[in-house]
Amino acid sequence: MTLALKIDYRLGGTPKYRLVGESDNLMQIPDEIRKSVVFICYKAADGMKLAGTAFFISITVKESGILFSYIITAKHIIDGIRSKSINQKVYLRINLKVGGADLVETPIENWLMHPTESDVDVAILNWAPSQETFDYRFIPLEMAATQEIIKTQNIGVGDDVFLTGLFRNHYGSQRNMPIIRVGNIASMPEEKVHTTWGDIDAYLIEARSIGGLSGSPVFAFIGSMRRIDGAMHLGRSGYLFYLLGLMHGHFDLSHLELDDLSRDSLINLQINIGIAIVVPVWKIIEVMNQKALIDMRELTIRKEQGKILSTLDTSTDISPIVHTWSVNLAAISGVFG
């Protein structure tokens, strides 16, 4: 098979270089997307239980070139574990590079929420496991569908979306096997959406959510041809994927809301009406940028820069050396590709 080096722009338009064969299809969803998710578990009186999905995300501080990694899930998953767990631990089921999967224990108190808004369904853990041991990838924050990206890419109602996460009926006995579900944007977050969680900022998407998919990353899936400001624009290569947000849940239709002819056979049945609720990515960014996490990033940067400076002669011009260190560190930090 002939191999060729191709530029892949799918991940938020950021160029990644891949060595691919003639049969490889850069129009498909990259494997890195599925590798960015892990499954959340907790310990109940009768054993370990699956609770939902989480995903790895990274942010690179441009001034230093240092990459910081986090794990994101839905706040209601962590709250549920807090009420049901017998040991107040959150377990992450992560695939191993040698095969199989392992459970990693995290204290529930280490999961942080939105600093000022209790109705934001986002929880974050300031940690990531060894990439030498575990088989996972980060979603770089550069893929975020911010309000600016929404405007410049003209993302709106009808655009395709997909999500990846836990399917309880087939989660993988040996390794995590996240599924892909697809749909489209049904409503933009122009007004708050009324949910059992409260009135929240949210997208509505035409895609069936199920319990295990709570906490999953949701992506906008746009083609290479876009109408922007009344004109057609051709993208650089294939499709683009942007991180739209986090799966919150779905609406159920009570049998009491059905017409009279339908009620008799549906007593006490809750029906998933196929509209899912997605927390916008900018709410995730707000959680990532709370003061406690910013302070941790700044402290890490000062420590790393201090290590470099302590090894240098004080008479040496350090500016080019620090610049080289930043670039090299960014290059080996291990985001997609």
Image (cartoon, rainbow, N blue to C red):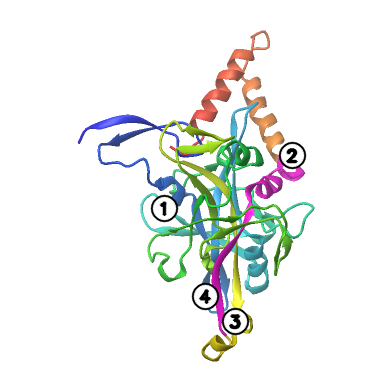
Which residue is rendered at x = 20% and y = 36% of the image?
1
Q: Is residue 95 magenta?
A: no
Do the numbered discs 3 and 4 sit on residues whose CB atoms are within 8 Å? no
**Residue 236 in sight in this render:** yes
Q: Is residue 286 magenta?
A: yes
Q: Which amino acid does label 2 sit on?
A: Asp
Going from N to C along the chain, the mark reached first, 3 or 4, is 4
Tell me the distance, in whole angstroms, between the alpha carbons under discs 2 and 1.
Answer: 32 Å
Other residues around mark 1 within 10 Å, as few (<14) / some (14–19) / many (≥20): some
Q: Residue 47 carries which label?
A: 4
Disc 3, SS: loop
**Residue 41 in sight in this render:** no
| Residue extending furthest toward the left | 1
Going from N to C along the chain, the mark reached first, 3 or 1, is 1
Percent x, y for residue 148? Answer: 65, 37
Q: Which mark is residue 258?
A: 3
Q: Which label lies toward us, 4 or 2?
A: 2
Disc 2, SS: helix
Going from N to C along the chain, the mark reached first, 4 or 2, is 4
Disc 1, SS: loop
Quarter of the figure with residue 83: bottom right
Do the numbered discs 4 and 2 sit on residues whose CB atoms are within 8 Å? no
Which residue is rendered at x = 70% and y = 70% of the image?
196
Tell me the distance, in whole angstroms, between the alpha carbons under discs 4 and 2.
Answer: 38 Å
Q: What residue type is labelled 1?
A: Leu
Q: Mark 1 points at which residue?
A: 96
Tell me the distance, in whole angstroms, between the alpha carbons under discs 2 and 3.
Answer: 52 Å
Going from N to C along the chain, the mark reached first, 2 or 3, is 3
Q: What residue type is labelled 3?
A: Leu
Q: Which label lies toward us, 3 or 1?
A: 3
> What's drawn in magenta, residue-wise?
269-294
